[in-house]
Amino acid sequence: MDEKLLWEKAAAFHGHVCGGLTIGYKASLYAIELLDITFSEDEQLVCIAENDACGVDAIQAVLGCSVGKGNLLFHMRGKQAFSFYNRKTGKSVRLVLKPAPEGMTREESFAYYQSRQPRELFDVKETTIAVPERARLFHSFVCGRCGETAGANWIRLAGEETLCLDCYEAYDRFNV
């Protein structure tokens, strides 16, 4: 594994270099080490990110986790934490960023994260969420009002109409 090449790949994907990208890059390297994984061509590797910050781009570029493939999911908690699952071995790990020194400039923050080994940056914890099922495919339906197509899981019936979530008006007697 050529770490310099992986860093360049992450930076090219993200569009610039920053401390946040470095966090995701270092989390990816640590996940590779701890779970004996490589780039995920399909859904054999899963990442659940607890934020939608810059580091997620590094995880996409380095590990091949993506929303479209169904192996990058978001459990938004505002934490610099990432759970990784290796479906082949059943192993998983949750990496939680340790607090960094306060009062650093952007440049100092970038240098700090770049100069640290992954084990210095992250607490290794057990995953708290079960490995998600593989992505499902859903039948599509045309909304009876707007005419747009939506997957069955996002369709509601209103009388005789089949409606997308944007057109459906939920019935709730308490929140009128």
Image (cartoon, grey):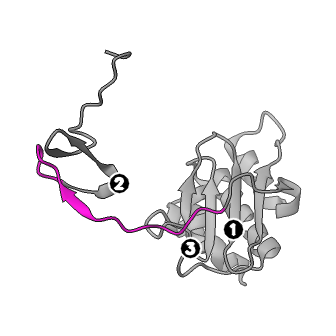
* Spatial CA span between label 2 and label 1: 25 Å
Characterize the local packing of mark 1: few (<14), some (14-19) or many (20 or more) Cα atoms within 10 angstroms. Answer: many
Q: In the rendered image, which residue does mark 2 sit on?
A: 153
Q: From the image, which quarter does the N terminus lie in?
A: bottom right
Q: In the rendered image, which residue does mark 1 sit on?
A: 85
Question: Which residue corresponds to the image point at 78% horizontal and 67% vertical from the top-left?
Answer: 30
- Compared to residue 109, the image places residue 68 above or below, namely below
Question: Which residue corresponds to the image point at 65% horizontal and 71% vertical from the top-left?
Answer: 7
Residue nearest the observer in this picture, 105 or 11: 11
Please tell me the numbered disc located at residue 64.
Answer: 3
| First reached walking from the N terminus: tag 3 or tag 1 | 3
Q: Residue 4: image x %, image y %?
A: 69, 76
User: Can see residue 22?
Assistant: no
Residue 106, picture quadrant: top right
Q: From the image, which quarter does the C terminus lie in?
A: top left
Residue 56, picture quadrant: bottom right
Q: Is residue 162 magenta?
A: no
33 vs 25, left or right, is right
| First reached walking from the N terminus: tag 2 or tag 1 | 1
Name the amino acid, label 3. Answer: Gly
- Compared to residue 48, the image places residue 175 above or below, namely above
Q: Residue 169: image x %, image y %?
A: 24, 31
In what element is the residue under mark 2?
helix
Name the amino acid, label 1. Answer: Tyr
Q: Residue 11: image x %, image y %?
A: 57, 66
Name the amino acid, label 2. Answer: Asn
